[in-house]
């Protein structure tokens, strides 16, 4: 199975690179190439970016072993919730995770479950060992390249919300997430002033 994954992932990367090379040729019909790329790789997903608040400062204060411990604990706490909510964990980079979901409501439910789990975990830990999670969500058409990465305006917006704008325990979402989400008891949206590039509006998810 691992061999099949490597072949599929490499094939996607190779095909994309060839199309980009074609797009760069003099007098290339870029619109036609772009259409090919979207036909091959374009998909609609909900995308989640997570980040751990104050992480760089903690590494400076407590060292690299503390860094590894926090990464390990956050993965142990959160990855099972991603699986429970039908998410696909594409990659982990440092203290951040990139996750995609077919259903925007599953992405929202997973985000809430993750925040609740970290809050419960933190009640029993000293401040230095807390897992302070920030979450950004986007939803829309994007380019998915195998099981390694996604690209698009909503991807960029979700990244900005999760990694730069959100505070501990916050879930920030784009306007497209709000539009696509079904109305559920105990969940609401509060508009925020900071709107990341690639999004028309942004909201703070309110949850019980």
Image (tube, rainbow, N blue to C red):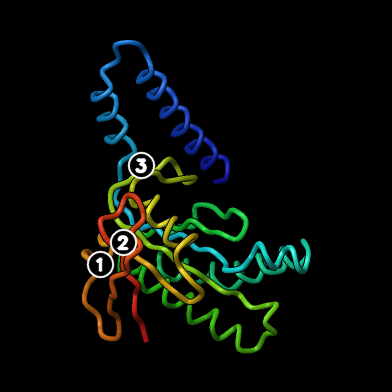
Q: Earlier in the sequence, mark 3 or mark 1?
A: 3
Res 106 → quadrant: bottom left
Q: Are marks 2 and 3 in contact (CB under 8 Å)?
A: no
Q: Is residue 193 above or below residue 36?
A: below
The tally of labels here is 3
Q: Where residue 199 appears, x then y in whole percent?
A: 29, 54
Q: Are marks 2 and 1 in contact (CB under 8 Å)?
A: yes
Q: Where residue 94 appears, x then y in whole percent?
A: 62, 56
Q: Earlier in the sequence, mark 2 or mark 3?
A: 3
The residue pinned by badge 3 equals: 143
* Residue shown at 60% from the left, 67% from the top: 75
C-alpha separation, residue under disc 2 versus residue under disc 3: 18 Å
Crowdedness near tag 3: few (<14), some (14–19) or many (≥20) residues, C-alpha within 10 Å? some
Disc 2 element:
strand
State the mark number for residue 178.
1
State the mark number for residue 174.
2
* Residue shown at 42% from the left, 61% from the top: 161
Crowdedness near tag 1: few (<14), some (14–19) or many (≥20) residues, C-alpha within 10 Å? many
């Amino acid at each position: 199975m691992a061999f099949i994954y490597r072949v599929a992932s490499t094939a996607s990367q190779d095909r994309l690179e060839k199309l980009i090379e074609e797009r760069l040729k003099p007098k290339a019909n870029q619109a036609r190439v772009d259409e090919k790329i979207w036909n091959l790789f374009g998909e609609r997903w909900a995308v989640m970016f997570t980040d751990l608040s104050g992480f760089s400062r903690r590494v400076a204060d407590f060292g690299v072993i503390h860094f590894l411990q926090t990464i390990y604990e956050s993965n142990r706490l959160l990855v099972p919730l991603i699986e429970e909510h039908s998410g696909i964990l594409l990659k982990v980079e440092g203290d951040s995770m990139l996750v995609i979901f077919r259903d925007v409501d599953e992405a929202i439910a997973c985000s809430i479950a993750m925040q609740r789990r970290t809050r419960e975990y933190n009640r029993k830990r000293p401040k230095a060992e807390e897992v302070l999670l920030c979450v950004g969500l986007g939803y829309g058409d994007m380019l998915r390249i195998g099981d390694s990465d996604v690209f698009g305006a909503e991807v960029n917006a979700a990244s900005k919300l999760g990694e730069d704008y959100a505070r501990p325990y916050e879930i920030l979402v784009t306007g497209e997430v709000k539009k696509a989400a079904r109305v559920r008891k105990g969940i609401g949206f509060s508009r925020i002033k900071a709107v990341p590039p690639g999004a028309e509006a942004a909201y703070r998810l309110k949850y019980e």
